[in-house]
Image (spheres, coloured by chain):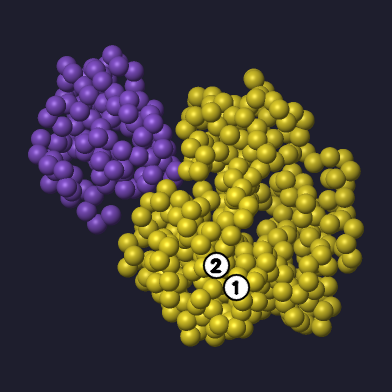
Amino acid sequence: MADLSGYRFTASHEWVDGESRVGITDYAQQQLGDVIFLELPEVGRTLSAGERFGVIESVKAASDLYAPVGGRVVEVNDSLVDTPERVNGDPYGDGWLLKLEDVDEAGAELLDLAAYEKLTAGH
Amino acid sequence: MAQRTPLYDRHVALGAGMVEFAGYDMPIQYSNMRDEHTAVRQRAGIFDLSHMGEVRIGGPDPVAAVQRLVTNDLDRIGEGRAQYTAMCNDGGGIIDDLIVYRGVGECWIVVNASRRAVDVAWMESHLDGGATLSDVSDETALIAVQGPQAVSVVAPLVDGVDVAGLRPFAFAWGANVAGVEHVVVSRTGYTGEDGVELYVSAEGAGAVWDALLEAGRSVDMLPCGLGARDTLRLEAGLRLYGQDMDESVDPYSAGLGWVVRLDKTPPFIGADALRGVKEKGAPRRFAGLRMSGRAIARHGMPVFSGDAAVGEVTSGTYSFTLGCGIATASLHSDVPGDAPLQVDIRGTRAGAEQVALPFYKRPST
């Protein structure tokens, strides 16, 4: 299990870590199953908290992705174009989606690990 | 509350994710779809398909009775052979797609779980000549072992039937498998691979499943869920009722003209309507699409040729074997076979090349 200290979570199953990297949770990747395609934003785009920024598609279903916090996209994980299965294999590490700068938490609704685990418990 | 198959507890113990499908709690995946899919293509996979319906037709002339119900011609196969076929309404719309097993003095019909009640009601009201029907779905489990190593896994466990000697679409009854009697062993499947399907009593299903799972260890066989079943069947170009066809679709439009035998005797229900469709030309044609990217074209998404809407996606998935999106589509019949197409995937047009079905054909041995 990854060290998730410094990670915060959304009810829509994204995370943001202490370095303002964004991804989806282990629970989310398990629910989705085999990830085969991601539609991610251009570098330079500014997102606000809760804004839809892309799509993650598995064999089962396509789901929208929402920004856990606001900020400017300074990097996207290009390795996911050819190996999207990294999201399944390491959702909190190699399977990160994008990195933000100039982070703006206005309007963000973030959960700590305990609250997120409570949300997903029993599912 | 969804029904459970006799193997439900085993799926849960194996850690499968369970979903409701056609009124049954079924395993969607045990590990992940890619590994399960690949196991079937390269080695072997085992499936619980006990949700499928089984109907026995008896009486003085069961073959004649079934001939009236289905579009394909049972005279083209002998006893001990199975045949893919369609059952149509008077207008030629497909009520269900079926496998008919021609036995001695009776026929077995395997129906889709989602269509079982409709099928049985239709059959009961259209059987003639004193034919009898008995729905044995609830007391019958179905276990499939599929893949290039399937026969080598199954054959050593079977007494009374030479599994390796069964040709494709042949079956035999009266086998003893892992101490369970009266098993029907069939060289059929829904994956595009060689394989075996075993029809077992509900009480015997657990013992047969356990023995097969144990025997499969030597080839690293995996239990496979409905997820891999769908990616495998679509690569193999096989239809799924409810997505690729329904009662508003005739067999020609669904690309199933090869199972329609208009000239057989006795004629089947819907033959007159289908003769008309054939003479006028079917309104639709069924096409394979190979997607230019990884995004999945899904059921119901519109298909375009330039600005013109020319049809809809019927099924789509990601092909683990080909490494791209694949789909089948119902197209207006005047769309040229070489026209480059696009699928509207969530507002973005994705390129789609028309290709012949199946997408995947197993290497000949």
Is B257 in front, or is B24? B257
Going by the image, does B139 lie left or right of A15? Answer: right
Could you tell me if the residues under marks 1 and 2 are in contact, i.e. CB atoms within 8 Å? yes
Q: Residue B60 is drawn in which quadrant?
A: bottom right
Residue B256 placement, left or right of A72: right
Amino acid type for the residue under numbered disc 1? Val
Chain A rendering hue: purple
- Residue A76: x and y in percent read 29, 23
Q: Residue at x 24, y 57 (%)?
A: A122
Secondary structure category for the residue under label 2: helix
Chain under numbered label 2: B
Residue reaching furthest top? Answer: A44
Residue identifier under label 1: B163
Residue B172 visible in the current orientation: yes
Quarter of the C terminus of chain B within the rendering: bottom right
Q: Is residue B300 visible?
A: no
Image coords of residue B126 (percent x, y): 78, 69
